[in-house]
Amino acid sequence: MTTSVLVTGGHTGIGGQCTRYLVEAGRHVVVASRDLERARHELGPLAERVELRPLDLAALASVRDFADLLIATADDRPPLDAVVCNAGVQIVGQPERSADGFELTYAVNHLGHYLLVRRLLPALAAPARIVMLGSGTHDPAQKTGIAPPIYRGGRALADIDAATLDKEGALRTGHRAYSTSKLCNIMFAYGLAERLRAEGSSTTVNAYDPGLVPGTGLARQYGAAARFLFGR
């Protein structure tokens, strides 16, 4: 039986390749993107073979509305049995805030995905799978060159104060926000997996590190030389 897969940011970079593979494998793919026009452009002819839906992970109201609508229209597509939490940002200029006041990298990479998964979890068709896009930057032992994470409870760098910014500069502070968001992804994946096992659920949770992948868009705020090196 054909099933559906939700891919956040499934129009470009790693997410775009994931979407192409799933479509070729015969899956129904729901591509969630903040900018549907850009998504159609990036996907090209493939856009006609997927279900495009608007989602702004930086706005919790958008996440709730997206999940609720997906559940309400469940009969319009094959059963949803997988969620790929792929979308992400890396803010290395002046810190930016989400619509809800959180540091933007943390809001998009972790908080929006956390709410999305928790909202959709009861509606997933068994046996379901949840996949989190992680990063080796969450582990200081991997020596990635990115500032290691700082975790201060659930909010985790949601507030970057002026002293931190003045001391480290925007680039290093942005790197630290990114690595912290990825640590939160890993902690969420482990915590949810343990809870689901304890409940006897057949849903599995995986987190993976794709390594350094050029051309994903994460370097779009870097200087010209870095954008060229990383394929923007």
Image (tube, rainbow, N blue to C red):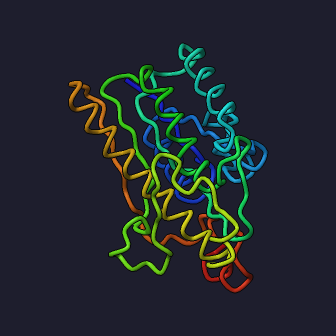
In the displayed structure, does residue 209 sit left or right of residue 44? Answer: left
Task: Tell me residue 3's x, y (percent).
Answer: 43, 27
Asked if 52 appears above or below 161 in the picture, the reply is above
| Residue drawn at the location 63% of the way across and 79% of the way down | 167
Q: Quarter holding the N terminus?
A: top left
Which residue appears farthest toward the bottom when viewing the image? Answer: 225
Q: Image quadrant of residue 220? A: bottom right
The residue closer to the viewer here, 176 or 127, is: 176
Asked if 153 appears above or below 125 in the picture, the reply is below
The residue closer to the viewer here, 43 or 131, is: 131
Q: Image quadrant of residue 232? A: bottom right
In the displayed structure, does residue 165 sit left or right of residue 78? Answer: right
Q: Image quadrant of residue 177? A: bottom right
The residue closer to the viewer here, 44 or 62, is: 62
| Residue drawn at the location 75% of the way across and 45% of the way down | 35
Asked if 90 appears above or below 49 in the picture, the reply is below
Task: Tell me residue 37's x, y (percent).
Answer: 79, 45
